[in-house]
Amino acid sequence: MKFKNAKIKILDLDLRGCLYLNNFSHSQRVALFFKIISRAGDGPFWYLMLAIVWGMQGITYSLQIIYLLLGGSVGTAIYKFLKHKTTRPRPYQVHQVIVLGERPLDHFSFPSGHTLHAVMVTIVLGYIQPVLLAAMLPFMVLVALSRMVLGLHYPSDVIVGALIGAAVASLIIFVAPLLGIAL
């Protein structure tokens, strides 16, 4: 009984957080801002950061770039597996009061792949080139917020996506030296 009550409270907090953040999308300017952030978080911003790291580290850094891209695909595999196992509908699909601000890339909500990759890339590239954190940290937070403001994710989707992203980033950083790859 206690577990059921706790689950109900968590789901209620999740919905209230989603409703609160989605309310900001009623402003067209705010919605457009977060739509741009979300689209840049699809990859363009992160590819730019990766190119900057490659430029700063030199062309001999190619093996590391391939390793980082392979590590990123681990994050993709994890979130796709979880999305298809949990099949959690997106907030706008369940609650008519939630405004959809951007077309989703896939059908399910849990976990947030955008947030997973934003956290993962920020940690790994920040580890390699800490100077980039000044740009990446604020963008990472904005990507996470954009997913809720646009009605695509609940806060729990974003939190779990961030935790998985941090775990994958830690794995990438930890395993690299074992494979003889100097980040």
Image (cartoon, grey):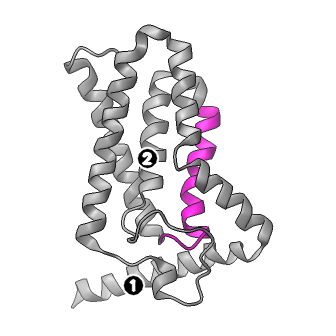
Residue 47 lies, in percent from the top left, at: 53, 34
Look at 32% across and 56% down and name the residue there: 79
Q: Residue flagged by tag 1: what amino acid is it?
A: Lys
Q: Residue flagged by tag 2: what amino acid is it?
A: His
| Bounds of the magenta segment | 133-153
Q: Nearer the viewer, residue 11 or 87?
A: 87
Q: Residues within 10 Å of mark 2 (few under 14, many from 20)?
A: many
Residue 52 lies, in percent from the top left, at: 57, 23
Image quarter in which the N terminus is found: bottom left
Judging by the rendered image, the residue that carries numbered circle 1 is 9
Look at 58% across and 32% down and name the residue there: 48
Q: Main secondary structure of the magenta part?
A: helix
Look at 56% across and 74% down and name the residue there: 151
Which callout, 2 or 1, points to the residue nearer the camera? 2
Position above or below: 120 against 151: above
Q: Residues within 10 Å of mark 1 (few under 14, many from 20)?
A: few
Residue 94 lies, in percent from the top left, at: 45, 87
Using the numbered discs, state the Cα–Cα distance from disc 2 to disc 1 in whole angstroms.
28 Å
Name the quadrant containing residue 149.
bottom right
Q: Nearer the viewer, residue 95 or 105?
A: 105
**Which mark is first along the chain, 1 or 2?**
1
For the residue labelled by badge 1, is the local secondary structure a helix, a strand or a loop? helix
Residue 158 lies, in percent from the top left, at: 45, 61
What label does residue 105 carry, if any?
none
Q: Nearer the viewer, residue 63 or 147?
A: 63
Is 148 colored magenta in this rendering? yes
* Left or right of 6, for residue 154: right
Image quarter in which the C terminus is found: top left
What label does residue 117 carry, if any?
2
Is 75 colored magenta in this rendering? no
Position above or below: 1 against 66: below
